[in-house]
Image (cartoon, helix red, strand yellow):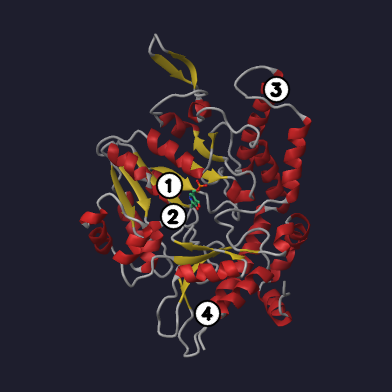
């Protein structure tokens, strides 16, 4: 792999002097992430990468003990029960969440945690579900539960070019809480589309107006500290592979105890009850998190969560944050300076152009000299051929995509109302229907073991889109 040009490395080092303090990540990368010797990975928001020591420690643990299904009292089961309890404590510690105030519900991923909230939040006719345009589909999907119970779902817009929410819009929306009702406000701490970090100060503001707050932390916590002794949303959702790559298949709902007590589960299942009867036609839900963990937890994968958290802490979230900030600043600066030969900008960025209140996600489209967007599928194909892993499309964040790409509500409803689109609508139908506009963007996202070479490699790739 080519090394970084010396002059670029020098300018980078003098522009971002704090980067040097993150050298431990370079050492780790060389030692523990061997696959990165030959690959350029720029998709950390989709999935983080794992260190070989995480795998080794996990395998060693499984090799040494006999772990059984945690639902009984035999020694193998008790060993698993203890590991699950340990993992819960480790998660609470990591988020500085007091066990007196917070519960951890283990789920398969952030989406399952969101579904738990959606199906259990006690929405009633007239209640409110408020959310930002900028949200993952698994947060958007809660609107269907809200509406099914007669609540209204309302969106707060985001505004170009930075794709943030205007303060006045938020204030107005927050005043619509139903007095004495159940009001839920959901937003991402960091957008998985634009990288914008929406203010955590909104939590207290929303509480003051009578809202419960659901904070989607899935794209935030890999590179930012979320201290739940400072910030007190009611619900936080998370997928652990986004923090440290391994294991996949484990996420959680962190819930304040009194918020969890407000939820009403629509069913019961194995693992969630104290007693259920067939002839007596009755069931009693267990207390706290147990009532929300359906069936058997992935008890063999769970201990790898504590190992992952320790791995992150051994580097330090603040250090990871700083490293990603430096690399993101360099990427933005270089990408935005690129021009077509006639002086037209090569890139249209969707999100903040500096590192102010944003994370390591950079989303954009390439444009040719005549101002036409380069189809994101072409970019993806060329990146794949160059062995660069990046993401294109809307990243399951349609609100972000619609605002970035200038797709209007009228345009979209016209498409959806066509008789042939009544029940079936593919991505290709979508493309045809909004003829002439882009349907997606290109996303590059950085993480704890990204380095200058990755970013330089991408900048070189971007230059290939400059015409003759
Ligand atoms: C902001 C955000 N929320 C939620 C999710 C859903 O995560 P999962 O697919 O692991 O359930 C993602 C995944 O990309 C995300 O970026």
Picture residue at 72% right of the left edge, 45% below the top:
55
Distance CA(mark 2)–CA(mark 3): 40 Å
From where the camera sits, is residue 12 visible? yes
Q: Position of residue 153 (x, y in %)?
A: 30, 47
Mark 2 beta carbon near ligand 1 (under 8 Å)? yes
Residue 65 placement: quadrant: top right
Q: Which residue is mark 1?
A: 138
Residue 76 image label = 3
Q: Position of residue 202 (x, y in %)?
A: 43, 52
Mark 1 beta carbon near ligand 1 (under 8 Å)? yes
1 or 3: tag closer to the N-terminus = 3
Q: Which residue is mark 2?
A: 396
Q: Which residue is mark 4?
A: 465
4 or 3: tag closer to the N-terminus = 3
Give the crowd class for mark 1: few <14, some 14-19, many >=20 residues within 10 Å.
some
For residue 101, side relative to residue 397 (left or right): right
Q: Marks 1 and 2: CB-CB under 8 Å?
A: yes
């Amino acid at each position: 792999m080519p090394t970084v040009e010396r002059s670029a490395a020098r300018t980078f080092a003098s522009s971002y002097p704090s980067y040097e303090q993150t050298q431990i990540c370079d050492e780790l990368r060389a030692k523990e992430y061997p696959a990165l010797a030959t690959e350029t990975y720029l998709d950390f928001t989709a999935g983080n990468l794992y260190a070989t020591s995480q795998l080794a420690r996990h395998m060693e643990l499984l090799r040494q003990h006999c772990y059984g299904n945690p639902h009984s009292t035999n020694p193998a089961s008790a060993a698993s029960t203890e590991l699950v309890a340990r993992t819960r404590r480790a998660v609470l510690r990591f988020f500085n969440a007091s066990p007196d105030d917070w519960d951890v519900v283990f789920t398969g991923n952030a989406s399952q945690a969101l579904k738990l909230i959606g199906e259990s939040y006690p929405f009633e006719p007239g209640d409110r579900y408020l959310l930002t345009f900028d949200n993952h589909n698994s947060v958007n999907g809660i609107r269907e539960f809200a509406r099914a119970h007669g609540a209204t779902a309302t969106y707060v817009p985001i505004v170009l070019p930075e794709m943030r929410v205007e303060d006045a819009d938020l204030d107005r929306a927050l005043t619509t809480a139903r007095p004495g009702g159940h009001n839920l406000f959901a937003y991402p701490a960091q957008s998985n589309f634009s990288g914008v970090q929406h203010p955590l100060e909104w939590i207290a503001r929303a509480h003051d107006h009578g809202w419960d707050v659901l904070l989607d932390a899935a794209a935030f916590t890999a590179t930012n500290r979320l201290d739940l002794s400072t910030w007190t949303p009611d619900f936080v959702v998370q997928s652990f592979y986004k923090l440290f790559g391994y294991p996949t298949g484990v996420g959680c709902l962190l819930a304040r105890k009194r918020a969890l007590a407000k939820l009403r589960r629509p069913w019961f299942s194995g693992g969630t009850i104290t007693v259920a009867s067939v002839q007596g036609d009755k069931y009693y839900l267990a207390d706290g998190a147990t009532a929300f963990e359906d069936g058997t937890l992935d008890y063999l994968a769970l201990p790898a969560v504590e190992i992952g958290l320790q791995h992150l802490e051994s580097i330090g979230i603040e250090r990871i944050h700083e490293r990603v900030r430096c690399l993101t600043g360099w990427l933005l600066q270089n990408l935005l300076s690129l021009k077509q030969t006639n002086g037209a900008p090569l890139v249209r960025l969707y999100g903040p152009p500096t590192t102010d209140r944003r994370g390591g996600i950079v989303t954009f489209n390439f444009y040719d000299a005549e101002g036409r967007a380069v189809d994101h599928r072409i970019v993806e194909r060329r990146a794949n051929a160059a062995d660069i892993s990046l993401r294109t499309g809307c990243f399951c964040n349609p609100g972000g995509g619609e605002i970035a790409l200038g797709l209007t509500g009228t345009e979209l409803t016209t498409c959806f109302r066509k008789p042939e689109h009544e029940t079936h609508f593919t991505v290709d139908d979508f493309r045809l229907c909004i003829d002439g506009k882009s349907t997606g963007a290109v996303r590059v996202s950085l993480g704890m073991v990204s380095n200058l070479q990755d970013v330089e490699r991408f900048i070189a790739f971007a230059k290939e889109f400059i015409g003759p």
